[in-house]
Image (spheres, rainbow, N blue to C red):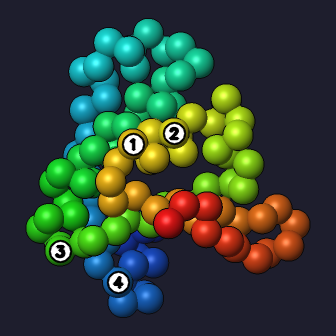
Amino acid sequence: MIGGPAHKVAAYIGVRLVEVQTREGEAEAYRVNGPDRCFHCKTELFSRIEQDVAPVYGLAAVAYGENADDGRRPDRPGSRAAASITRCCGHSRTRGTGQGDSARQ
């Protein structure tokens, strides 16, 4: 939604906001709505970013946020999806400390 909250925050802090069109709904594995649906959704999102966005903006890496234990939790497969994308670099926030540490480099 153009003019929505994310656009307002981006304008306020002076950064570009890029919206990415995804098509996870076209994937049968996603539509079954199984416990791994997040993996398929994130795979589609990260793939679109890597293939469609990163080359246009000259991005060597794409950072995303995750919880410190996401890589170990089977119910949080987004980090597995990100690991399969060359340019993704996770950034974990350690719970309760407010301190972040790099999950993948």
Q: What separation in Å lies between label 1 and label 4 (alpha carbons)?
A: 27 Å
Residue type at numbered disc 2: Arg
Q: What separation in Å lies between label 2 and label 4 (alpha carbons)?
A: 28 Å
Name the mark nearer the viewer: 3 or 1: 1
| Crowd around label 2: few <14 · some 14–19 · many ≥20 (10 Å) | some
N-terminal-most mark, 3 or 1: 3
Q: Residue at x 39, y 79 (%)?
A: 10
Residue type at numbered disc 4: Val
x and y percentages locating residue 13 in the rendered image: 44, 88
N-terminal-most mark, 2 or 4: 4
Image-quadrant location for residue 57: bottom left
The residue labelled by disc 4 is: 15
The residue labelled by disc 3 is: 58
Choose between 4 and 27: the one closer to the eye: 27
Q: Secondary structure at mark 4?
A: loop
Q: Residue furthest front?
A: 105
Choose between 45 and 81: the one closer to the eye: 81
The residue labelled by disc 2 is: 80
The residue labelled by disc 1 is: 84
Q: Residue at x 32, y 37 (%)?
A: 44
Examine the rendered structure and indicate whether residue 68 appears above or below residue 78: below
